[in-house]
């Protein structure tokens, strides 16, 4: 009898140890949830998972629920002083935009700068030749950040141009998100390295140092040449953006060439990301060149990500909606906004603002489309106009307010872009450029079909259940 008790003692103590360890993990995770989670619904959900799934819940919270990069970023991105509020507006900025301009000053802690020229590039057929020509003309530096850099015909063309730039003595730095790099069986970073290109992966998922950051991805699209001309928008580097190829996975998108002082802000976003990833600090005239005025646009780079710039874009969106006098127009591939954004759009519609939301009829992520469909009734029933654009899948990201303000860049209208991903957007305060973008949206709406309340209500029960279930996971889609 005594021998059996002695034999069972280690087993019993192991259970006691695991029990206390699980309790400690749940308590620590719960304390973090209570202190850090601002959304009470999110906090309750995490608390339930943590206590109902011992160890697993705490591990999932550590992996997906903790914004850890924000603390780390303080070491390399010191908090800047707030600039003074702008007292005067340029001739190209309406008085209606004054409050939005001041909001941007406070949110981004930078001031908008005048003298910029922005040229839209439609589809890969326009964007890629312009980008490749810019790389081929580079004399001093090329910086490129992208989510996806595919090993295909387009990716090879870019790799060749970057390799040739290195051979000419140009300083080249390429930053690819580690998840996006895995879209190709043959990762392009290896090919770039063989060509002498300095390339790095952002937050490698299989690195112990960054494993718990795997939910936070680099979604920016940045190309800067000699610190003087920048390209940004929604396009990755992959051949399906060239719609004329007729691929089944074709993607329609819009990119932008930017010249002028705002390029310095775009380059700073890249150099911060590069320093965070590699420890190398890029500074000097090789990377940043003083810029003379190139055009009439007053612009601002909006840096956004789970660091010191958390929710910058979300604040700008809310401010833009509240500043609208006549019309709000949104183009986005993924539309799963949070309650605050939905309320802001509905409030605008109820006070007589025309709110138009253009979404793709086809989507490369079906579960995001399901979640979006489960959300649409909330804006349609209050008078927002929602349209479904025809194939191919439209990946464009645009927002215009009235005829004087445009937001362009990489961010979508979902929690992943507005809270988890590292994004870059550009505010453009200019009537002529905004009219040009509104003309583009007009053309797309003419090709699109309106989505009415009866269409949403008449979905079969199984479809509504599927869509509603997908919406439960919207913070992580």
Image (cartoon, rainbow, N blue to C red):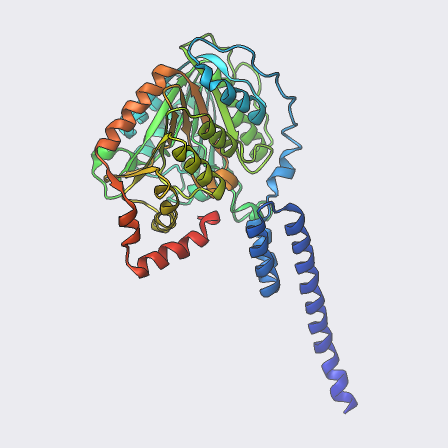
Instruction: Give the number of marks.
Output: 0
Foreground residue, 40 or 290? 40
Q: Position of residue 434 (x, y in %)?
A: 36, 20
Foreground residue, 417 or 317? 317
Specify the quadrant of the image occupied by residue 389.
top left
Q: Residue furthest front?
A: 351
Q: Is residue 444 left or right of residue 403?
A: left
- Asked if residue 17 shows in the view, the reply is yes
| x 23%, y 44%: residue | 248
Q: Position of residue 43 (x, y in %)?
A: 59, 52
Screen quadrant of the N terminus: bottom right
Is 103 rendered above or below residue 92?
A: below
Q: Is residue 14 left or right of residue 394?
A: right
Specify the quadrant of the image occupied by residue 221.
top left
| x 50%, y 14%: residue | 113
Q: Position of residue 273 (x, y in %)?
A: 54, 31
Is 88 rendered above or below residue 304?
A: above
| x 33%, y 50%: residue | 366
Foreground residue, 21 or 105? 105
Q: Position of residue 473 (x, y in %)?
A: 46, 53
Is 193 rendered above or below residue 17?
A: above
Foreground residue, 472 or 26? 472
- Asked if residue 226 shows in the view, the reply is no
| x 34%, y 23%: residue | 132
């Amino acid at each position: 009898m005594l021998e059996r008790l002695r034999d069972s003692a280690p087993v019993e103590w192991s259970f006691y140890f695991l029990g206390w360890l699980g309790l400690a993990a749940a308590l620590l995770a719960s304390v973090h949830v209570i202190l850090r989670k601002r959304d009470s619904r999110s906090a309750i959900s995490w608390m339930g998972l943590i206590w109902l799934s011992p160890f697993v819940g705490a591990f999932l919270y550590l992996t997906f629920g903790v914004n850890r990069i924000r603390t780390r970023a303080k070491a390399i991105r010191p908090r800047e002083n707030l600039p003074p509020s702008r007292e005067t507006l340029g001739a190209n900025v309406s008085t209606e935009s004054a409050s939005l301009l001041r909001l941007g000053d406070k949110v981004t802690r930078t001031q908008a700068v005048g003298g910029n020229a922005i040229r839209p590039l439609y589809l890969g057929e326009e964007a890629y030749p312009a980008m490749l020509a810019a790389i081929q003309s580079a004399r001093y530096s090329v910086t490129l950040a992208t989510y996806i850099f595919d090993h295909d015909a387009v990716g090879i063309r870019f790799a060749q141009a970057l390799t040739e730039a290195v051979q000419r003595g140009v300083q080249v730095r390429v930053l690819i998100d580690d998840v996006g790099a895995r879209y190709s069986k043959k990762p392009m970073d290896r090919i770039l390295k063989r060509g002498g290109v300095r390339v790095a992966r952002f937050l490698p998922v299989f690195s112990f140092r960054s494993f718990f950051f795997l939910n936070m991805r680099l979604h920016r699209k940045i190309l800067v040449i000699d610190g003087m001309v920048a390209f940004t928008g929604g396009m990755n580097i992959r051949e399906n953006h060239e719609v004329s190829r007729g691929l089944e996975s074709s993607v329609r998108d819009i990119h932008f060439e930017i010249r002028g002082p705002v390029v310095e802000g775009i380059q700073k976003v890249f150099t911060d990301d590069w320093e965070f990833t590699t420890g190398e600090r890029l500074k000097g005239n090789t990377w940043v060149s003083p810029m003379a005025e190139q055009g009439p646009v007053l612009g601002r780079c909006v840096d956004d990500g789970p660091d010191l710039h958390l929710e910058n874009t979300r604040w700008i969106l809310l401010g833009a909606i509240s500043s609208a006098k006549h019309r709000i127009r949104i183009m986005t591939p993924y539309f799963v906004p949070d309650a605050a954004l939905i309320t802001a759009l509905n409030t605008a519609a109820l006070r007589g603002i025309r709110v138009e939301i253009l979404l793709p009829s086809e989507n490369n992520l079906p579960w995001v489309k399901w979640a979006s469909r489960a959300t649409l009734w909330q804006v349609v029933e209050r008078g927002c106009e929602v349209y479904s654009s025809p194939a191919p899948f439209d990946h464009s990201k645009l927002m215009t307010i009235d005829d004087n303000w445009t937001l362009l860049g990489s961010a979508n209208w979902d929690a992943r872009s507005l809270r988890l991903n590292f994004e870059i957007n550009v505010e453009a305060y200019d009537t002529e450029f905004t009219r040009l973008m509104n003309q583009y949206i007009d053309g797309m709406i003419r090709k699109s079909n309106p989505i009415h309340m009866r269409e949403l209500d008449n979905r079969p029960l199984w479809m509504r259940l599927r869509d509603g279930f997908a919406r439960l996971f919207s913070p992580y889609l």
